[in-house]
Amino acid sequence: MKHSLLMILLLIFLTQVVAQTPISDAKRYWNLHGVPKFVQETECHIYNAIIADSAEATDCNTVTESLFNPSGNRIRLTETNQINGELLVNKTIATYKDEQLISYRHYDKSQQLTKIGVLSYPDTMTRIITNKNASGEFVGKDILTYDKNGDWISYTAYDTDDKVFFKAILSYNDKHQQIMVKKYKGFENKLLEEKHYLYNDKGFVSVEIEKKPKQIKRTYQYISYDDKGNWLRKVSYEGNKAKKMWYRTISYYK
């Protein structure tokens, strides 16, 4: 369970910072317009609400903070959770050389180093991340592939025996906007999750639909945007009931 959670956190981080393309990572993966410097995202639960405008957001215990460099590459990811009054902080630090990600370091809630990832680039369409624990022992690898446009199209995670335990496949429209993600468990090709993204006439993501086997379909609606077109508030629904709300504050280099 701990290994799976760390893998998910790493995947979230890498989706923002790994690909080396002419388009900034902030634009490519977060669809952030402008040149963001700092993004803070707060997750809250919603109770007794049918529509978002009447929702009462409480228990805002999870805060994710991302720091970008002037080139739009994310160099620090911090996730803070407050559970039973205890503040838990996980952090990932990225190191770049000539605008190319070369390594990352993950720290747990005690600020102890738990994982190190070293990147290699065998060709323009492949990224390999070799993962080690704090003692330098090999704990697995991740392989990311890209198409000729630089769009990220797959992520495959391998364990220490070189066996696949997780895979994600991504699809895009002709505007290079991500429209679908499918996540699978290992070689079984057992579908874990499927997401679809819809965009408005301004090119901003407006609806996200999440499907998991034997679970109620979840829909995310993007409610408000800043003057650069980046979303500031979104709400998740299960059926017709609002369940969670996210708030973002964004500062920019320019």
Image: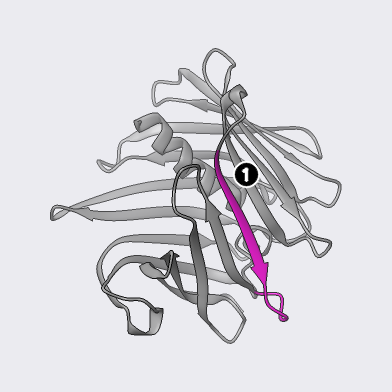
Q: Is residue 92 left or right of residue 231?
A: left
Between 134 and 174, the one nearer to me in the picture: 174
Q: Can residue 75 be spotted in the picture?
A: yes
Name the residue nearer the viewer: 226 or 50: 50
User: In what quadrant of the picture does the N terminus appear?
Assistant: top left
Res. 20 visible in picture: no
- Kind of element beneath mark 1: strand
Q: Quadrant of the C terminus?
A: bottom right
Q: Name the residue rendered at 50%, 66% in the picture.
A: 220
Taking the spot 37% from the left edge, 69% from the top edge, the residue there is 241
* Residue 245 point in image, percent of width and height: 38, 70
Q: Is residue 151 left or right of residue 158?
A: right
Taking the view exactly as shown, the residue that stands out farthest to the top is 161
Q: Is residue 87 magenta?
A: no
Residue type indicated by callout 1: Lys
Magenta stretch, overall SS = strand
What residue does disc 1 label? 182
Picture coordinates of residue 206, whole percent (x, y) = 60, 73
Q: Residue at x 41, y 66 (%)?
A: 41
Q: Residue furthest bottom?
A: 227
The question of residue 197 being in magenta is answered with: yes
Q: Residues within 10 Å of mark 1 (few under 14, many from 20)?
A: some
What residue occupies the far right of the structure in this picture?
148
**x, y percent for residue 131:** 52, 27
- Where residue 114 sits in the image (x, y, percent)? 37, 32
Along the line of sight, which residue is nearer the eye, 73 or 6?
Answer: 6
Picture layout, residue 203 above or below residue 174? below
Specify the quadrant of the image occupied by residue 243.
bottom left
Q: Which residues are the magenta region?
A: 192-204
